[in-house]
Amino acid sequence: MNNRCLHCLRIYLVLALSLIPVFGALAQLQQSDRLEIPTSSSATEQFEVFSLGQQGILSVIRGNEYSANRNEQWQFVKYDTTLKAVWRTGYKLDFRYIPVMAYKGEASGYWLFAEPDTDRFLFLQLNYNDGSIDTYKGNLLSGVDVQQFKVIGSKALVSGYYRSRPVVIVHSFFDHTTRVLPGLFEKNTELNNVDINDIDGYINVITYAYRKKNCVFEIKTYNYDGKLLKKTSLSDPRNSFISGQIIPLNPDDSYLIGNYSVGCTQYSQGLYVTHIDHDTPREPQFIEFSELQNFFNYMKPKRRERMLEKIGKRKSLGKENRFRYRLLVHELIQTENEIVLVAEVYYPNQRSSSPIIAGGMSRPYVSRSLEGYRYTHAIVCGFDRSGKFIWDNTITIKDLTSFDLQEMVQITPVDDYFVLAYPQEGEIHTEVIRRDKVVVESEKFKINPKSEKEKVLNNEDGYLSPWYGQYFLAYGMQRIGTSSVGQGREVFYINKLTYKTEDIGKDAKEEASRPR
């Protein structure tokens, strides 16, 4: 080996060693508990899992036995945080009804069922504490395309479209009265969100309308009885508001955070935040994607460099940058000092049908032929409690597709870090950030069977959701067996995963403390 090669080798070794203190944290995602539920060969089954925080989890199994009885059997099981069963209860759903949506409340879960081609609906309330079930029947509107279902107090809010126009229907469980919220049944208007404020008893309906070549973003606020209290309109001559989530400070003061586009399109140009005092919005702060420090980090270095050069050149010439990103914005995360926004960037992919396992509440049950979706990256942005944008970060998503458009990347605050994770083909991909810094780069962890003698033969429909503290839930279908020869057995699994942050940066601290 010549001297030049030796010199190069020394440089590579120095570079490799210099990276160890920064990224030398040991793998910290651990599989602490696992539940395996064998699937039935004599029934068609569908599985769901709902996180109840420190109360545990709720498992729902729907199945039809191959018999003359057409009623669908629903089994609800609550497990504690060690995945041990607390109670079980069953319910036979009248075959005339089909499931529409579910909603997770603080003390109870709610399910909405509809009798097709009629105005008859059924509500099921499940008490998390003891598994008791109450049902309520109501007459709503026939032919409503339901988009959201929520519960405030003893009233159900069913929102969607009736004859291509938006409606929000309020149904009382106690006196069985039904009313439609006023001021919403307008053409060229889309429902963006129905936000409930349980503490103050307010209902905020957010809509997106196209009027006289302008896009108008409106918030209509109703009281618990359905009376319209105020209307807030947001409009900008250049930018259009695509989505918005309300952060209430008091009954008359709040922040609105979401994403925006240039012109009346669904392609996001960036993020915005605006302060709403009573019903008057102040001047919004628009944050273009090019202003984010890490937005384009999902690209390969050379492509990212070319993109930034192109953006800089257009700005120097006084030209606008136009981006065509589709964003799936998650529910905002609120900590003591921050408001955290997570959004995934996706593209429509091939067409396919819905998977057998659902990934959370507040999603339609109706089986539809859907576009597949491909995810490229997710952004994480922090705002302080006064609504000021302070930091951003990005996690790259490689070759992840989903038949359903749903939240794939999960984020959990742990100590002074945020753990980002998403499932893919029987593995969990993780990354740990501290605000705008990556402290543990991308790692992969396999989801293993309960018995060490068995191995995973096949993975299907894997999902991940935050649970409580540093714990995640991973669940889906697996075929497992002792040998790759043979069919093995199919199970629905639920894994409790924990991420320990104690050793993050430990190598760097030890290196710094060593005597020189």
Image: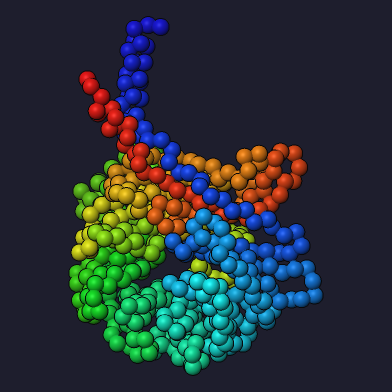
134 to 396, vertically: above or below: below
The quarter of the displayed image where residue 345 is located: bottom left
- Which x, y percent locates residue 302? 36, 37
Query: Residue 406 at what x, y percent from top left?
Result: 49, 61
Q: Nearer the viewer, residue 4 or 412?
A: 412
Residue at x-position 34% and y-position 29%: 20
Q: What colouring method underlies this structural image? A: rainbow
Is 75 placed above or below 153 here?
above
* Left or right relative to 318: residue 212: right
Q: Residue at x 40, y 76 (%)?
A: 194
Observer-nearest of 469 and 406: 469
Residue 179 left/right relative to 297: right
Query: What's the residue at 23%, 76% (across, down)?
Result: 250
Q: Position of residue 408 (x, y in %)?
A: 47, 55
State the image coordinates of residue 394 (x, y, percent, origin top left). 35, 48
Picture residue at 45% right of the left edge, 77% below the top: 150
- The answer to whether residue 274 is visible is yes
